[in-house]
Image: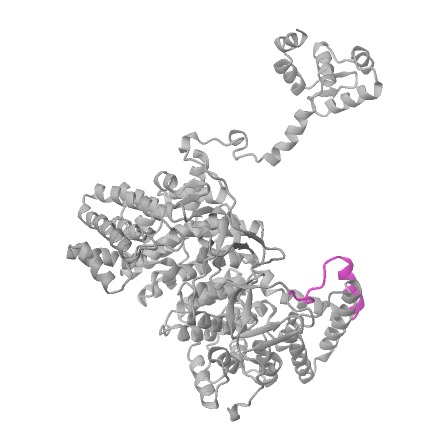
Amino acid sequence: MVRSELHQGLEGVTVAETSCSRVDGEAGELLIGGVPVEALAANATYEESVFLLFEDRLPTADELADFRADLATRRDIHADVRAVLRRAAEEEASAMDALRMGTAAATLGTEDCSQTATARRVVAVFPTIVATYWRYRQGEEPIDPRTDLGHAANYLYMLTGEEPNEADVRGLETYLNTVIDHGVNASTFTARTVVSTESDLVSAATAAVGSLKGPLHGGAPGPVLDMLRTVHERGDPEAYVREKLAAGERLMGFGHRVYRVRDPRAAVLSSAAERLYAASGDDDFFETVRAFESVAVDALAEHSTDRRLETNVEFYTAALLDGIGIPQALFTATFGVSRVAGWMAHCREQRTDNRLVRPVSRYVGETDRTWTPVGDR
Amino acid sequence: MSCEDGTITTTRDDRIADVTPSVFDPRLEYTTVAETGLSDLDGENGELVVVGYPIEELAANASYEETLFLLFEGRLPTADELADFRTDLASRRELCAEPREVLRRAADEGCAAMEALRMGVATATLEGDRSGPQADAKRAVAVLPTIAATYWRYRQGDDPVSPTETLDHTANYLYMLTGEEPSEADVRGLETFLTTLIEHGMTASTFTARTVVSTESDIVSATTAALGTLKGPRHAGDLGAILELLRDVHESGNADAAVDERLAAGDGLKGFGHPVYRVRDPRAAVLSAAAERFFEESAADGFLASVREFEAVATERLREREPTRDARATVEFYAAALLDGIGIPKSLFPATFAISRAGGWTAHCLEQLEENQLVRPTARYVGTTGKTWTPVENRHVAGDSLVGRPVRSASLEPVSETLAVLSEPNRLEILLLLYDADEPLAYSALRRAASIEDKGRFNYHLRQLREYFVTDRGDGYELTDAGRTFVRTLLTEDRLLDDLL
């Protein structure tokens, strides 16, 4: 028997070979399908990024047009699923609970259940599930998806019922490209484990939604936004930072488990947010965000000398998504709307060279108990 | 650290792990992912202990609720505690109208039971008590039989039967399937099945559940995820196929022939050999005894006799073939016989497995949350690097304009082989001779004109060209269009004169 080492969080255990993305925590670099995140985020449409992950290359103009059209035909959800989402909204279930419910039933009413069709279906239907839930949550009727709009624009359209402006679409598209894949994190690993038993992609996506739902993974862009708003209203970012640190509290939106330097996605989202706020003319708030970042990074450097804490992806996610008009309650679900393509790409990769995941546990409980009838307990 | 199969690597991408070297272990077979107090598998000796109790003791004595309490609390309940726990679970069985409609739809569309179960359990938080992990755990376990039975009733074209709080977990499941109060023998048989399979170490599904809650997500999400994992044929196994096998054997009345036939066909034998147990799976013994009791009472023991004979023959044959490996009947073998005897429909076998295992999943989640650590493994990047952005109008893909999609290099290999035929001077000479002739050249004329003296070699080269570049018209040889185009474009005056100089 080979000695087995205890690695509870699997830190330092390499569980897969992947060509979906490369995370270099030391250098602060992220490649997605071989392309640096900076190039992808600023240039690609979301559909292009999805194609890149699925096919490992960028599409030609014709291929892209076909792919967009194909995804757009897969957006509708079945009336019975809508009823479940309405119910979830009425009970004020969280958006991630609703997304789990909608994803679990994503194949209802669809015909083609090949792997390729299912992967596309799952990616295409996420925005519809989230927007449908949100409309009900607001007491409004859901808005049917429009096939003439791109993925990102259609998501915004289904949330508001109005055709979105170009700056908002570009901002959202940049966000969706930026967080589309990030190595084998908890949700991606969950999806890969699910398909390792030769289960299906809908089950994998549903499972991954459940993983992403947890605050340790899906993160805290919502609370970051609360913090930024508080600071903006109060005015003095420096005082706020000192207060928090003196009280021994953590500052949300700073530091990342993998990156030793600034999360490259933070830089990408920071310039996207800058462009967005410049276009909307509401750059007061954004100035506060910038001021807060520089004050906080300095204060954190004084506070903890062993490690430099920089803004992470959540920090500018909050500012950017809020600027676009994505409701705070949908931040994590919007993360899911992007990441689902990474999950599907990883599942396809896992299936091409599959190995059943069957880890080992160590028993530390009681032994040699004997049965006591209930009357004698 | 030594690993038989696992390679130790420290790469640039793994620097997160510069404290310890990174181990490549995609199956996680060399990695202990958790310490657990829930169950202990001893594959060498064929022993399974659940929270301290040998599985044989639990299966013989405990109700499903008692076993679940044991997993959640680490001890058996007192009489009062058990009564409260049963009542509490029973109050969490209801399914509201919207998920019922989804299940009806799933049944109408012919979805598999495990798909329906996934859809149902994903909505289990609706109308629920969301007070915390314990509430979610109980809800997930309590509602699964209702989901499976509701789906099944719709599938049969019947209306679902609402759960009744007067019946226990197991009896209520049977009741919801048929609408009739089940016999004691059926309840006892199913209870043994549910208790025996409730927990089995760190399987793929259990590990999925723990990974989900490691992000501090909730236990309904974790159960949904685990169910999706169990759905895969490599995990849930194929209880239905085993039942069919057993029925075939029973009907043919010839176990020897059935075993030999399948082994000769190289199919292997379903229901024999377990990856963890080197001896007989202890759960197989438990379910075998349960099946014996059950079939005696129901007087349908002809079937069980066939099953027993089949096991004996198969075990012997497998030993003859592979003496070093003790491939015994797995738990699935008797599970299929037992579930069928009880009257569980074959298409609900995996769902019924899930109904049992949900107890283990939720208990593992509660355990994980007690001392939580986020699961965040590492991956090794094997893709390309250094790509830069190409605007869409500048992207070109080989073959795109010809076939409308990129041509893979594998499909270019035959073409490349055809071109290789030309890469030989004697053959080029033959092509030139045929090009110069105004009409088809007879074999003898061509042979005379060519400078190759050896007849065998001449024939060989001509044969090579005949695939694609030269054709035999009966009255002689001439170039094909491809041959003519090739000579005209590549064997030009300039090239040939250059060569002469």
Where in the figure is residue B11, as x and y percent of width and height?
Answer: 50, 48
Where in the figure is residue B306, as x and y percent of width and height?
Answer: 75, 74
- Relative vertical location of residue B411 with respect to residue B120 in this rendering, above or below: above
Image quadrant occupied by the N terminus of chain A: bottom right
Q: Judge by depth and name the residue closer to the eye, A212 or B260.
A: A212
A168 relative position to B120: left or right: left
B370 relative position to A317: left or right: right
B4 inside magenta stretch: no
B499 relative position to A305: left or right: right
Where in the figure is residue B382, as x and y percent of width and height?
Answer: 52, 44
Q: Which residues are magenta?
A: B253-275
- Relative vertical location of residue B395 with respect to residue A54 in this rendering, above or below: above
Residue at point 55%, 74% (across, down): B39
Q: Judge by depth and name the residue closer to the eye, B79 or A3.
A: A3
Colouring convention used in this rendered image of the protein: one colour
User: In the picture, residue B498 is in which quadrant?
Assistant: top right
Q: Which residue is situated farthest in the bottom direction here?
A: A375
Where in the figure is residue B261, as x and y percent of width and height?
Answer: 78, 61
Q: Could one spot residue A89 in this view of the protein? A: yes
Residue at point 48%, 90% (across, down): B79
Q: Judge by depth and name the residue closer to the eye, A26 or B228.
A: A26
B260 inside magenta stretch: yes
Q: Could one spot residue A102 in this view of the protein? A: no
Question: How many numbered marks have been drawn onto this rendered protein structure?
Answer: 0
